Image (cartoon, rainbow, N blue to C red):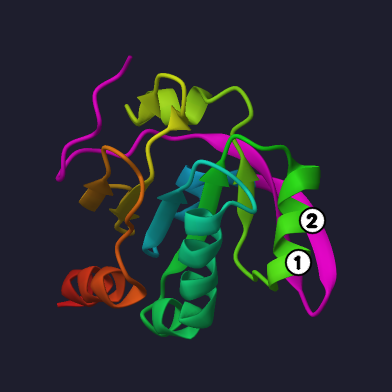
């Protein structure tokens, strides 16, 4: 298994299929990390759609999405479920950030966050406009997650 990328190193590039819900309409497409160069990106890896902690985490990020976008950033949620599952999850909870399907956990392995029996460890990475990891939070158990306020603080630091 790959090591979790250190702060100050290049974020592993990837392309994953995903879906985003805007005004009730689902738009599917491929999402490539390197295509986001020039603006910060938050990668929020979560273990599963429609589970209690994951739902709480992604709903809190959606509620504060304007805080991320006001700083020029975007948030992508990434988990092992397929795009159909992500669309149902997004519709049910009015999630408006892209949800990406890492079905085979290839990207989770690149980021060194796979966990035996649990799929992946809940993790958040802040990537700057040059594709460099600037902050990370990787949990051992996955029952907690960084708040939107904590993450926007990291995005604010990038702009300084």
Residue, disc 1:
92
Classed neighbour count for the residue bearing mark 1: other residues with Cα under 10 Å, few (<14), some (14–19), many (≥20): few
Q: Is residue 156 left or right of residue 25?
A: left
Classed neighbour count for the residue bearing mark 2: other residues with Cα under 10 Å, few (<14), some (14–19), many (≥20): some
Foreground of the two, 86 or 157: 86
Label placed on residue 116: none
Does 108 appear above or below 126? above
Q: Which residues are magenta?
A: 1-30
Question: Residue 81: horizontal and vertical position, in percent?
Answer: 66, 37
Q: How many marks?
A: 2
Q: Residue at x 38, y 25 (%)?
A: 115
Q: Residue at x 52, y 81 (%)?
A: 63
Does 7 appear above or below 120? below
Q: Residue at x 42, y 52 (%)?
A: 43
Q: Secondary structure at mark 2?
A: helix
Label placed on residue 88: 2
* Callouts 1 and 2 close, C-beta under 8 Å: yes
């Amino acid at each position: 298994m790959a090591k979790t990328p250190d702060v100050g190193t290049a974020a592993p590039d990837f392309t994953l299929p995903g879906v985003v819900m805007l005004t009730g309409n689902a738009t599917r497409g491929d999402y490539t990390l390197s295509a986001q160069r020039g603006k910060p990106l938050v990668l929020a890896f979560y273990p599963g759609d429609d589970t209690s902690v994951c739902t709480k985490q992604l709903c809190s990020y959606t509620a504060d999405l304007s805080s991320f976008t006001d700083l020029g950033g975007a948030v992508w949620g990434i988990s092992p479920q397929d795009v159909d599952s992500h669309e149902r999850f997004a519709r049910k909870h009015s999630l408006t950030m892209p949800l990406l399907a890492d079905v085979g956990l290839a990207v989770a392995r690149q980021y060194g966050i796979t966990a035996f029996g649990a799929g992946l460890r809940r993790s958040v990475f802040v990537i700057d406009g040059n594709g460099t990891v600037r902050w990370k939070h990787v949990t051992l158990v996955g029952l907690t997650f960084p708040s939107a306020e904590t993450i926007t603080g990291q995005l604010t630091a990038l702009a300084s």
